[in-house]
Image (cartoon, grey):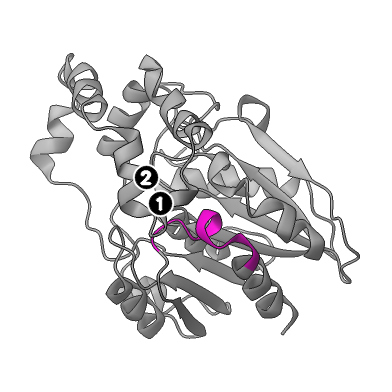
Amino acid sequence: MNYVDRYPVRPEDMNVQHYPEAGNASPPRLFVLIHGFMSSAYSYQALIPELRLYGEVVTFDLPGFGKSKKTLRYRYSYAQYALTVNAIIKLYVTEQTEVIPVGHSMGGQIALRLPKIMPRLPKKIVLLASSGGIARLPFWLRAATYLPFFSTWLRRYIRKHDVSNILHEVIFDSSIVTDKHVSAYEEPLREKAMYQALTKFIRHREGDLTKTELAEIHVPVLLLWGEADSIVPLKVGEKLVGALPCATLSTYPEIGHLLPEEMPKETAKAIRSFAES
């Protein structure tokens, strides 16, 4: 038994949110929304009503984040996350369902790993300001995670940063940031178990997919990017679209890193057009 599937988290241990289609897509279509680092399914709350018009939607808090379980037995790696996402997908698909993973930021790296493990290839993949080109964390930092006080130090370090300020920095039009918005991102940070899970994520996270690995993904991929993204700059998207065999990049001026929240209608329309092409 390898480490990747040793300690899976069951879907019932996760905050999984399923939304039936509000339109009438044919063939049936399932959009699988995968959030980014230090985020949760909440990041898709503005996109879901728009996307439901074009297909069924499932989203969730990845293990270690949001309201999902934060067990220390889970291996917090991209490979294990992909297996967990695939287990959720199996709950909602038939042989006719077109599966379209949508990954934001770190979620893009998880989405790109799905073709290798899914029994049937996803129909298409959508990347929203996906991370790319990030190496595995240095050995000294991974080794430090075995120190008993590491998660406490991590909590103090993260809690020094103001969530409201961060949201104002990553969103181009900060007028959309509300108190509810800030609270939704801040609430998981109060949970001690999250920092213990994050410690293991630092230890287990692989590097992003290499050029060789990206070249093996023969699934059509749409990349959507905000030109004002200060977290994952546009140049990352340009490198990804050059490395993926069947990829298209669309960019948007005056949009930052949180595309699902900054431009939900435009994002949904772009995804629909891509899904139906």
The one nearer the camera, 235 or 90, is 235
Asked if residue 46 is among those painted magenta in the image, a careful observer would answer no
Q: Which mark is residue 167?
A: 2
- Check disc 1 and report its element: helix, strand or loop: helix
Name which of mark 1 and mark 2 comes first in the sequence: 2
Q: Would residue 246 appear left or right of 130 to someone viewing this image? A: right
The one nearer the camera, 267 or 90, is 267
Asked if residue 261 is among those painted magenta in the image, a careful observer would answer yes
Magenta span: 256-265
Give how far across and how far down residue 23 sits, in percent. 88, 62
Work out whether residue 123 can be spotted.
Answer: no
Q: Are marks 1 and 2 in contact (CB under 8 Å)?
A: yes
What residue did someone put label 1 on? 174
* Residue plotted at (50% across, 84% down): 248
* Residue plotted at (46% across, 85% down): 245
Query: From what the image shows, is residue 61 above or below residue 190?
Result: below
Query: From what the image shows, is residue 24 above or below residue 71?
Result: below
